[in-house]
Image: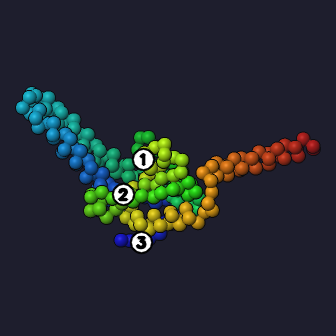
Amino acid sequence: MERTKVDIRKDFKPAPQLKKLYGYYLNIVFFAGFLSWYVPLILLVQEVALAFLFILFFLVYVFVAFIWIPRYYDTVFYRLTESEIVWRRGVWFKTTGIVPYNRITNIDVTQGPLSRRLKVASLKIQTAGYSAQKASAEIRIECVENYESLKETIMSYVKSGEPQAVGTYEEKVNLRILEEVTKIRQLLEGQSKK
């Protein structure tokens, strides 16, 4: 297993195997889902309707396999900074997020049989306060080859920070806002004295 470190402040992507993994999932859904009800319909429905259904599902399959999966892969980015993990993804609906290290409580490595075959895994990162509200992880770093190394890197940032309360991130933001407002006030008072 490759043990490279992720460059801080540089975007990184999932492994290219993500496209193949999603292709496997698509094949499972298509063949198990579509064919399981399409075959019995052969006995009950007219040939024209069957041909229409087959063409429709075939076009959807081709669209997802050759257009959506590669485009989705191109939109997925992650970045580690000194204080947080930033992520973004989405073909039609763009999603971005930030997870501060001081809120991370747990990192789980998940690897199904197909992921194991492709030698990749995903990191599910859970945070304080957020995970109790939602059953899923706040961020999922998908399809990483050097997952143990990445987990160790993130945990080193989590452990290197001072133990802080859950509200600390918001408190820092509020402090920055207060500092800026104070500077603006001082500038305005300086202009009014002139």
Query: Residue 22's x, y, as percent?
Result: 30, 51
Query: Residue 50's x, y, as percent?
Result: 13, 32
Q: Nearer the viewer, mark 1 or mark 3?
A: 1
Residue at 61% of width from left, 60% of height from top? 163
Say which element carries label 2.
strand
- Neighbor class of circle 3 (other Cα within 10 Å; few <14, some 14-19, many 20+) is few
Which label sits on residue 136?
1
Residue at 34% of width from left, 51% of height from top? 70
Which kind of residue does numbered mark 1 sit on? Answer: Ser
Q: Mark 2 points at which residue?
A: 110
Say which element carries label 1.
loop
Residue at 44% of width from left, 40% of height from top? 93
| Distance between the alpha carbons at the discs numbered 2 and 1 | 13 Å
Say which element carries label 3.
loop
| Distance between the alpha carbons at the discs numbered 3 and 2 | 18 Å
Q: Which of marks 3 and 2 is in front?
A: 2
Q: Earlier in the sequence, mark 1 or mark 3?
A: 3
Q: Which of marks 2 and 1 is nearer the N terminus?
A: 2
Residue at 38% of width from left, 52% of height from top? 73
Taking depth in this image into account, of 2 and 56 the one nearest to the observer is: 2
Which kind of residue does numbered mark 2 sit on? Answer: Thr
Tell me if I can see residue 169 in this picture. Answer: no
Question: Which quadrant holds the C terminus?
Answer: top right
- Neighbor class of circle 2 (other Cα within 10 Å; few <14, some 14-19, many 20+) is some
